Amino acid sequence: MPKSLSLLFAGVSVIFMSATAVSLSHNRWLALLFFALTILNIGYGFVVKARYRRKQEPQQ
């Protein structure tokens, strides 16, 4: 996975985590939404990384 794509996933995850922290004191449902988006974004980052790694492996 290119470093720029990794940085994008990390940056978006940090933004979602920060939004979760801020929304905890305001609205619990909004905090739950941001938490779910954080988990989905991190999971999707791992999926993209695995697909990119599998694509780079030499064919047998």
Image (cartoon, helix red, strand yellow):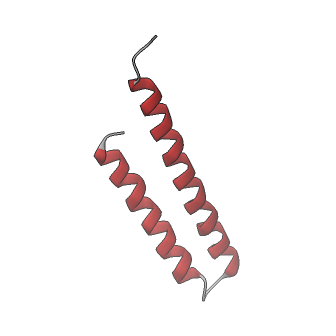
- Residue 50 placement (x, y as % from top left): 49, 36
Q: Quadrant of the N terminus?
A: top left
For this view, does 19 lie left or right of residue 58?
right
| Location of residue 34 with respect to 6 vertically, above or below | below
Which residue extends farthest right? 29
- Residue 28 placement (x, y as % from top left): 68, 80
The residue under the point 46% across, 62% down is: 13
The residue under the point 59% across, 54% down is: 40
The residue under the point 70% across, 75% down is: 29
Residue nearest the observer in this picture, 42 or 22: 42
| Location of residue 34 with respect to 9 vertically, above or below | below
Which residue extends farthest front? 60
- Residue 21 placement (x, y as % from top left): 53, 80
| Location of residue 26 with respect to 7 vertically, above or below | below
Residue nearest the observer in this picture, 38 or 3: 3
For this view, does 29 lie left or right of residue 53?
right
- Residue 35 placement (x, y as % from top left): 61, 68
| Location of residue 41 with respect to 57 vertically, above or below | below
The residue under the point 31% across, 40% down is: 2
For this view, does 46 lie left or right of residue 10?
right
Q: Quadrant of residue 20?
A: bottom right
Q: Quadrant of residue 14?
A: bottom left
Which residue extends farthest bottom? 25
Count of marks overlaid on the render: 0
